[in-house]
Image: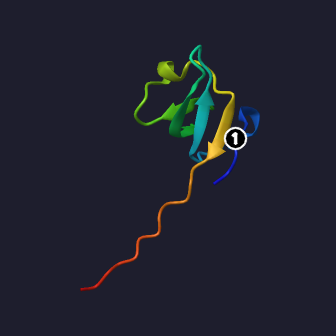
Amino acid sequence: MGEWQDIGSAPRDGTRFDIWIPSDDGGYRVTDVHFNARGALTHDGIRAKDLARWPTHWMPLPAPPIINSVEG
């Protein structure tokens, strides 16, 4: 998995990634976000105004698990 990177280097091409949003309690991670065609940070399950605190860092999504099919 990747490491946290400055938000300024986040992909703007629709690629999904995780972000870190600082808060008074330390901060929190929001997973599976992307920049839309208008350049706004977007998450399918979170309203845009709830992402109003600008993130400081981003990280690529982890690779999906490899699932071995078992015949039996």
Horizontal arrangement in the rendering, residue 62 relative to residue 4 (left or right): left
**Residue 17, visible in the rendered structure:** yes
In this view, the residue in front, 65 or 43, is 65
Quarter-of-image position of residue 28: top right
User: Residue at image x 32%, y 81%?
Assistant: 70
**What quarter of the picture does the C terminus occupy?**
bottom left
Residue 7 coordinates in the image, percent (x, y): 71, 33
Q: Which residue is mark 1?
A: 4
Residue 32 coordinates in the image, percent (x, y): 51, 42
Q: Please rate how many residues cluster around mark 1, counting C-alpha atoms within 10 Å: few if below 14, some from 14 to 19, many from 20.
A: some
Quarter-of-image position of residue 25: top right
**What quarter of the picture does the N terminus occupy?**
bottom right
Horizontal arrangement in the rendering, residue 58 relative to residue 61 (left or right): right
User: Residue at image x 28%, y 85%?
Assistant: 71
Residue 20 coordinates in the image, percent (x, y): 61, 31
Quarter-of-image position of residue 47: top left
Residue 9 coordinates in the image, percent (x, y): 75, 39
Q: Secondary structure at mark 1?
A: loop
